[in-house]
Image: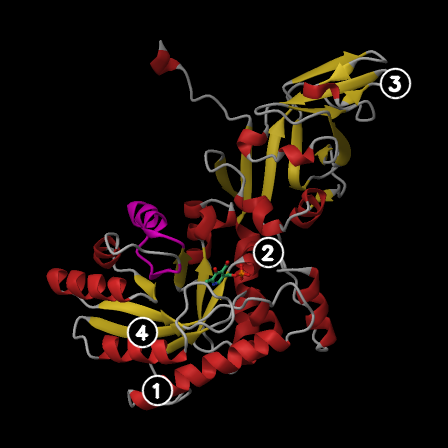
């Protein structure tokens, strides 16, 4: 009997707009190429592809010609390889010495700032008869992971002297580039980074930056840096948020305008959908949900949505958020529960059990006209957080469907 049944349809899912992802990669690639040299694009797919779905998003990025993928840890790398994705992968997060042989076996390059990891990488590469490619992280102002100038030089010497290791890159990460329109600190970080990389080149007799024989990948740029200063991109850019169609911040947008440049058009790629489970009428004076935080002051028609904070629809959105039904806004009322959310649909006459609801993203009107949009930035504003957090916290279990 069970065999004759089809798979149950999910009641909430993510639609990933392939064309939007392709567009963003093209735009970012063009931007980065303004620096003169076209750098390798390393798109960060950590955090479940910023919540867009690790495998689904990665496949779209690879179709768009992305060269490298950036992950946080060994487990994301394993997931990529298990899905048959063989593209170069760079691990930016912490690897324990015990995890290092797995990273080496899967051909990853990884960030290096620790002597024990260096020893583990050398031993693993020797045992596996391969060369482990490492990127030394330089401390320039973030105080996570990096080595200060002299320690970075010493690490570079140790890597260069080890026949099982290749010093493929040097990296740093901006501490204060998105949150401000004053980029003095970011420039100071760049200066420290450049001084350190130059010293390494000199000490190890490597060709200078820009030389045809230069193979060292010195990389600092994330999306904000790429948009602000394409000329400093170097040979590799670690780009995250922009690839998903979101500006890093209002400040970044403003800063690009202040530099006299036309801000590029990025296209958000994620739409989070669900369906109405039930519509019911609530008489005046009755309450909705836990804690009785909503009381009907008019005869109220409500829709129950089969999603809650377990799905990543944050409880902080209770009585605050709006959803879209037929392209129009309807307010979330009462407390968001673990698996259920109530919406006031008194003014949404088309709302029925089974109607499609958009929690995040755009929706056309009932007549096919342009409807409204709830952006990740707006939702982040409701929650007092950043849009990076909004998308990455959408539960991994929810299906990501590539559309377009
Ligand atoms: C080391 C590193 N590089 C690059 C990025 C990408 O940053 P963005 O998403 O702002 O482009 C991140 C994101 O957190 C990161 O941790």
- Identified at 58% across, 31% down, the residue is 309
Q: CA distance from mark 3 to mark 4?
A: 66 Å
Q: Earlier in the sequence, mark 2 or mark 1?
A: 1
Secondary structure under the numbered disc 3 in the rendered image: loop
| Mark in the foreground, 2 or 3 | 3
| Mark in the foreground, 1 or 4 | 1
Q: CA distance from mark 2 to mark 3?
A: 40 Å
Residue 245's label in the rendered image is: 2
Residue 168's label in the rendered image is: 4
Start-end of magenta stretch? 72-92
Residue underneath mark 3 = 298
Residue underneath mark 1 = 201
Which residue is at the front of the view, 98 or 392? 98
Secondary structure under the numbered disc 1 in the rendered image: helix
Label 1: how many residues lie within 10 Å, few (<14), some (14-19) or many (20+)?
Answer: some
- Identified at 56% across, 79% down, the residue is 188
Q: Earlier in the sequence, mark 1 or mark 4?
A: 4
| Mark in the foreground, 1 or 3 | 1
Label 2: how many residues lie within 10 Å, few (<14), some (14-19) or many (20+)?
Answer: many
Q: Earlier in the sequence, mark 2 or mark 4?
A: 4
With respect to residue 148, does 401 lie above or below?
Answer: above
Q: CA distance from mark 1 to mark 3?
A: 73 Å
With respect to residue 129, does 189 lie above or below?
Answer: below
Residue 81 covered by magenta stretch: yes
> Which quadrant would residue 71 be assigned to in this image?
bottom left
Residue 206 seen in the figure: no
Tell me if label 2 and label 1 are in contact, CB under 8 Å. no
Secondary structure under the numbered disc 4 in the rendered image: strand
């Amino acid at each position: 009997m069970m065999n004759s049944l089809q798979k149950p349809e999910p009641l909430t899912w993510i639609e990933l707009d392939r064309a939007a992802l392709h567009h963003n990669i093209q735009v970012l690639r063009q931007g980065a190429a303004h620096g003169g040299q076209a750098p390798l694009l390393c798109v960060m797919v950590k955090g479940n592809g910023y919540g867009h779905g690790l495998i689904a998003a990665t496949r779209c990025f690879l179709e768009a010609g992305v060269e490298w993928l950036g992950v946080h840890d060994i487990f994301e790398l394993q997931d990529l390889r298990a899905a048959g994705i063989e593209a170069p992968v760079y691990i930016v997060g912490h690897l324990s010495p015990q995890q290092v042989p797995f990273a080496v076996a899967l051909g990853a390059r990884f960030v290096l700032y620790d002597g024990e990891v260096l020893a583990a990488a050398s031993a693993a590469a020797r045992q596996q008869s391969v060369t482990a490619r490492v990127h030394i992280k330089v401390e320039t102002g973030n105080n996570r992971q990096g080595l200060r100038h002299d320690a970075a030089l010493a690490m570079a010497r140790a890597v260069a002297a080890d026949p099982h290791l290749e010093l493929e890159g040097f990296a740093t990460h901006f501490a204060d580039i998105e949150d401000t329109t004053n980029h003095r600190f970011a420039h100071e970080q760049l200066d420290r980074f450049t001084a350190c990389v130059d010293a390494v080149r000199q000490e190890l007799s490597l060709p200078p930056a820009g030389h045809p024989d230069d193979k060292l990948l010195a990389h600092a740029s994330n999306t904000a840096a790429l948009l602000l200063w394409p000329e400093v991109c170097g040979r590799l850019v670690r780009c995250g948020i922009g690839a998903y169609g979101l500006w890093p911040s209002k400040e970044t947008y403003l800063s690009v305008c202040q530099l006299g440049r036309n801000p590029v058009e990025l296209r958000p790629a994620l739409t989070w959908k669900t369906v109405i489970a039930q519509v019911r009428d609530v008489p005046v004076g009755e309450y909705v949900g836990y804690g009785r935080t909503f009381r009907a002051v008019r005869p109220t028609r409500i829709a129950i949505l089969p999603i809650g904070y377990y799905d990543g629809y944050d409880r902080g959105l209770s009585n605050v958020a709006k959803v879209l039904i037929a392209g129009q806004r309807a307010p979330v009322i009462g407390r968001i529960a673990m698996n259920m959310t109530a919406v006031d649909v008194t003014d949404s006459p088309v709302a029925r059990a089974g109607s499609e609801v958009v929690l995040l993203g755009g929706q056309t009107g009932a007549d096919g006209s342009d409807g409204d949009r709830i952006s990740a930035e707006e939702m982040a504003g409701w929650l007092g957080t950043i849009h990076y957090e909004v998308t990455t916290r959408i539960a991994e279990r929810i299906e990501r469907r590539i559309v377009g």
